[in-house]
Image: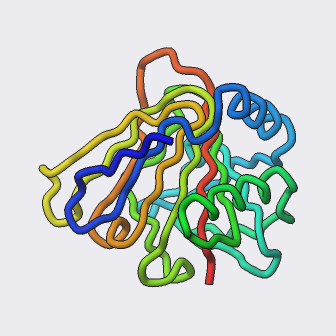
Amino acid sequence: MEKQILPLAKASVSYIPGFLSEESASEHFQHFLNTIKWEQRDVKVFGKVYPQPRLTALYGTPEKTYRYAGLTLVPNKMAPKLAALQQKIEAYSGFQFNSVLLNLYRDGQDSNGWHSDDEASLGKQPKIASLSLGAPRSFHFRERNNHQNTFKVELHHGSLLLMGEGTQQYWHHKIPKTRKDVGQRINLTFRYLI
């Protein structure tokens, strides 16, 4: 399995383009599109409330709620297909997870702004695995202390992005809006909530 180490200073980030086969990725995409309990929530940004520009869902350990951007997400019970993917990613990465935040980007206008996944509930050096299904989208990194230092990678159908130590501490990331005619994308971000 091909693995690319991304050149981000002080951060451990790797990209595995064919983590799932085309067939497996497509089957998982359709399954999650149709069975996940998708929600669009309101988020507070700089004191103003907006509908989140994507749909989300949290699955995992029942008592492990997740708080970010003024939201408190209570997890749904981990579904069998999510649990199987979690085990596969844990075996490959050596990371441990107990929850997965899913995002559904319906078109190019759905996005995720600059942020780091550095909430206290993720611990001091969170490790996050992001599995992409569906339409490719551009994933941007920006160094926290030098916004001129950027890097981007195209996340393809069936690919896995592993963000290890240093990533959330020293870098922001985002999925920007695009005017391109892009299809739907689902990403599963596995994480460990303490």
Does 185 sit left or right of 2 as displayed?
right
Q: Nearer the viewer, residue 65 or 12?
A: 12
Name the residue at 53% across, 39% down.
Answer: 159
- Looking at the image, which residue sits at the far top? 181
Q: Nearer the viewer, residue 74 or 82?
A: 82
Q: Is residue 9 above or below residue 188?
A: below
**Percent x, y of residue 142:** 25, 53
Name the residue at 65% across, 58% down.
Answer: 101
Does 151 sit left or right of 80 as displayed?
left
- Looking at the image, which residue sits at the far front? 1
Does 189 sit left or right of 114 as displayed?
right
Q: Is residue 20 above or below residue 39?
A: above
Count of all numbered marks drawn on residues in the image: 0
**Percent x, y of residue 187:** 60, 44
Q: Nearer the viewer, residue 64 or 54?
A: 64
Quarter holding residue 100:
bottom right
**Percent x, y of residue 117:** 46, 66
The C terminus, quarter of image: bottom right
Q: How is the image coloured?
A: rainbow
Quarter holding residue 143:
bottom left
Name the residue at 33% across, 58% down.
Answer: 172
**Percent x, y of residue 60:** 76, 68
